[in-house]
Each structure stands twice: as C-alpha cells, then as structure tokens.
Image (spheres, helix red, strand yellow):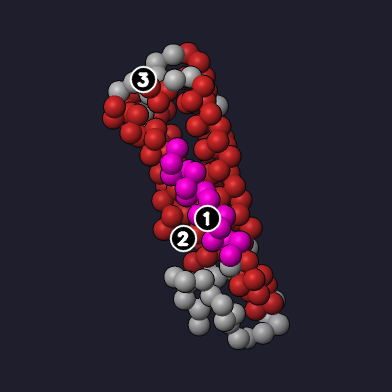
Amino acid sequence: MIGLLWFGALATAAYWVVWFGIDRSWLATANTPAYYTFENAFPLSDGWMAVTAALGAIALQRRRAEALLWTLLAGSASLYLAGMDILFDLENGIYKSGDLGNLVVELFINAGCLVGGAAIVAFAWKHRRYFLGLEGVEAGASSAPARDAPRGVVVG
C-alpha cells in the first residue's frame, strides 16, 4: 500500500511536469480547446490527491494513526478524479479518438485512479481498528503494539 500511494503521488507530479513543462502532446488524447480547458482544470485537485497520498505513505511507514485519515482522503480523491475524467472521456468520445499510445496512457490513468482509489479506501477501512489503536500507543497509553497490523506493515 505504501508503494501504491507513493506511485500515485509521484506519477501525478510527473504527469504535470510533462504536461506543462515538456510536451503535452505526449499525453493529450484530443486536440480541442474544450479538452485542454478540461485538463488544465485538474492540477489543483491532482495536487491534493498527490499530497494526501504522500502523507498517507509517510504515516503508514511511520505506523501513525493519521494513516487512516490520509489514506481515506487519498483514495477518495482518486475515485472522485477518476469519475470526472471517465465521464468526460465517455461524453466527448475520447476513448474512440486520438493516438493509440495516448489512449493507452489515458486508460491507464483512468483505471489506475479507479482501481487504486478503491483499493486504498478498502485497505484503510479494513484496517481502521489497527490505525485507531495506534492513537493510544502514540499518546503513551500502551507500549504494546497493536496486534492486528495490516499485511505488509511490520509492527514491533
């Protein structure tokens, strides 16, 4: 999960570096003013998703209770952005047009945000008791680590 969160944060940053700083034609699946206006509306929301994903990864690495908050926020942001992007693409024929390579990138982003976001939310919710149990440990209520650590999160 830590890897997925870091991948999402870093891939999002890389996307916008390419879009604004290198060559947006590498990513664009359409060449219309409406498409560019739509894409240019995403950086702030994508930035929020990337920040919450990075904070979630850091909190998971440090086994902090706030991992629950940040992972739920990151997963939810990813699902929301996937919904916006997929609906735009369906309504505007994006999946039917454009360069095959750019279409593959678009589908990867859409599927990644949808599946990744759902996986992050499911992971966070499944292990919520573990994360909430860390609050007492962080506050000094107990020196014993929580016993139901999520698979892949080593405690002790």
Residue type at numbered disc 2: Met
Q: Are marks 1 and 3 in contact (CB under 8 Å)?
A: no
**Residue at the spot x=29%, y=27% of the render?**
100
**Residue at the spot x=58%, y=65% of the render?**
126
Distance between the Cα atoms at labels 3 and 2? 34 Å
**Mark 1 or 3, nearer chain start:** 3
Residue type at numbered disc 1: Ile
The residue that mark 3 highlights is 97
Which range of residues does the magenta coloring cover?
Answer: 110-126
The residue that mark 1 highlights is 120
**Mark 3 or 2, nearer chain start:** 2
The residue that mark 2 highlights is 1
Query: Residue 101: where, in percent of width, then height?
Result: 28, 30
**Residue at the spot x=50%, y=54% of the render?**
119
Mark 1 vs mark 3, foreground winner is 3
Local SS, label 1: helix
Is 27 one of the magenta-colored residues? no
**Mark 2 or 1, nearer chain start:** 2
Q: Main secondary structure of the magenta part?
A: helix
Q: Is residue 106 left or right of residue 53?
A: left
Q: Are marks 2 and 1 in contact (CB under 8 Å)?
A: yes
Local SS, label 3: loop
Query: Against 28, is 48 above or below?
Result: below
Q: Which numbered marker is on residue 40?
A: none
Query: Residue 60: where, in percent of width, then height?
Result: 52, 65
